[in-house]
Amino acid sequence: MSDTRLVTRHALAQVGCRLADSVARRLLAPPTAAPNDPDNALRDAVAFAREQVPALPPLAAAVSPDHPLQRLRALPVVDVASGIDREAEAELLHDLALLSALGEAHEGYAALLRQVHPQGQPWPTVALALHWLEDEIGQADPQAPAELQRRRVLALRDAIERLLRHGPVARLGLWHTEGDGPWHSRTLRVSDALWATLMDHHPAGADSRVVTGYADVPGLQAWLQQPEVRQAVLALQRGLPCHLLLVGGDAAMRHTRVRALLGAARTVSVRHEASDEPDGAAAERLGPALGLAWLRGASLWLEDRDDDSGAPASTRVPPLTTGPLVGAVPVISSALHERRCMALDLPQIRLVVQGLSPVARRSLWQSLLPQLGDQVPMLAARYPIEPDDAREVVRDLALRQHLHGHALNVDDVGACVRARTAWHVRPGIHRVQPQSDWGDLLLPATAVEPLQSAVRRVLQQITVLDDWGFAQGRSGRRGVRMLFYGPPGTGKTLAAEVMARALGVDLLVVDLSALVSKYIGETEKNLAAVFDVAERSRALLLFDEADALFAKRTDTQDAHDRYANLETAYLLQRLERYEGVAVLTTNLRGQLDKAFTRRFEAIVEFPEPDVAARQALWRLHLPAAAPLSSDVDLAELAQWYAISGAQIKNAALAAAFLAAAEGGTMAQRHFLWAIEREYDKAGRAHPGFPPHHAPCLEDPS
């Protein structure tokens, strides 16, 4: 039995004995020899209660001031209107708390309470508390004048009513009364939170939960050493009245950092989640959380998990209405921004929450996966992951190794990271799991080299920017921004997919038509959401056909021009802050604002494929199992028709379906007809047919 629980049982036994003595004085007649004496059951229950104090193991030491009952006595809520002094009020709080919990302590106490409850329930009533304590007043000073005794009884009744119904203690949720009659006839029951605290358990199913800290958080060691963070840890260790604000990041980041603070301070906190209830109902739930924090010697953690940056200032977290307790425990508020935190008249420490730095991510992976050795920096560069997510990934990796038995590699880590990545579907964003690799990209060396260089740049960012010091405190130097330009169908989107696969991340394709809004400010809001999703999903961001949104800014002629220019300026700033890879594609490079071009790390031209590239593209898009007729001449098709890679892909597929419909093999005429259709779709003049082929005058199907 824990020391806390043993002290509680001793205190319960003493209150039970006092109650039994009072019941015996007031309700029991002298015993008779009659076998059917109706008071026998009550006598047995009274006898049980009187026997419990000597039956318990003795206390080994003095009661700690941190015991919940001692903290209850020291509760800094002095109710001057109660009519009794501070010491008497503390004693009254102690007695009411234990009386309300007596039925939970033992079935013997429950039997005693059943005997005196009007409905035979195993709980005390408020009337029982009144009569018990009034009786003890009379026993304490039996010679006092009747008038003085009446005043003492009335003061006691007033104090109990305020403690149970009206005063600041009543809002702490230590107990509750049940029933519809007058207040003094109602049943008095201990709250689950108070009973669990008295018995050294964590409350189960309560609105507020007792949470412990993390003993060690890989990746946050440097953060915990920052001066402001060390001050916060010291304040929690000492239990100083203060208000710690953790703002920024997302809900998962804030949660991890609060738990890291608690772990570093070796303390616990009562976590209370903000709700959408009206202020009155929310305040009703908040009082018990504050009371539980005081009894536990813990801090109070008010957690707002809403990550909607466009939400208005919060009215959901009401002001604390429990008086002096506000300044009695440390309060932690975690929210997206300060407007969603309540204002408290307490000393304040503000901690801005941001994602792990690249160096911290490297430390994180080195701690969790030391067996990867020199591949760890690659993981840190690829995946801006948080400690909790990384721990889950490591658990997934352990399962994979147990099932398959192969050695751990970076690709396994990437697969687990993507599987664990939270994906929130938003209009205008399409997620692509890349399948193509460098072998599928048929481009001239002048186009391929900048793509591979960009991949290397991402993977070497920590070395250059952090270890070598080139970051120089400028966030805009992280990330890679690229412009792909060239005619339609020349492989711009495919190149982005290949880069995403090389980096081990997904591709997010942005449909700008779904983001641009005629309403002022909506476009910026939609774009901010796109970047937020990209950062959380650790993906390569592709703005396909970006001309409309990234076009040149114009002279301001009217309000529409002014807000269009603001949208462009917002994109410039947001692109610079984005730490991933962002790719813009356009068919017309000259349409883009020049302010964008200087912000690109690479501008890559995608030219029309030459003859050799077209022949290679034909081979690439014809599977080995495709039934080709002997007259198919891919070299001739490549020489005669100057079409793009996308058109070659479409033509190869169309020719296959045509041949399958005829039930034969793919002949040259099928390819010629499919190519002719591609020219028609593009609105281009058909160059005719090779000399030795008859023209396709109609659809062969």
Image: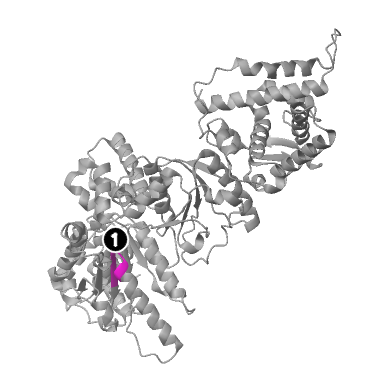
| Residue 439 visible | no
User: Magenta span has 637?
Assistant: no
Q: Position of residue 223 (x, y in %)?
A: 31, 52
| Residue 677 visible | yes
Q: Position of residue 355 (x, y in %)?
A: 34, 56
Check disc 1 and report its element: helix, strand or loop. loop
For this view, does 593 lie left or right of residue 438? right
Q: Position of residue 165 (x, y in %)?
A: 72, 45
| Residue in the foreground of this view, choosing between 412 and 148 | 148
**Residue shown at 75%/34% (left/top)?**
125
Q: How many marks?
A: 1
| Residue in the foreground of this view, choosing between 653 and 231 | 231
Figure quadrant of residue 401:
top left
Q: Residue furthest top?
A: 33
Seen in the picture, residue 319 relative to 32 is either above or below; the reply is below
Q: Amino acid at mark 1?
A: Gly
Name the quadrant of the C terminus.
bottom left
For this view, does 319 lie left or right of residue 508? right
Q: Position of residue 379 (x, y in %)?
A: 24, 51
Figure quadrant of residue 587:
bottom left
Q: Which region shows up in magenta?
A: 576-584
**Residue shown at 60%/33% (left/top)?**
195
For this view, does 375 lie left or right of residue 393? left
Q: How is the image coloured?
A: one colour
Seen in the picture, residue 582 relative to 24 is either above or below; the reply is below
* Crowding at mark 1 (Cα within 10 Å: few <14, some 14-19, many 20+): few
* Residue labelled with disc 1: 664
| Residue in the foreground of this view, choosing between 202 and 366 | 202
| Residue in the foreground of this view, choosing between 679 and 588 | 588
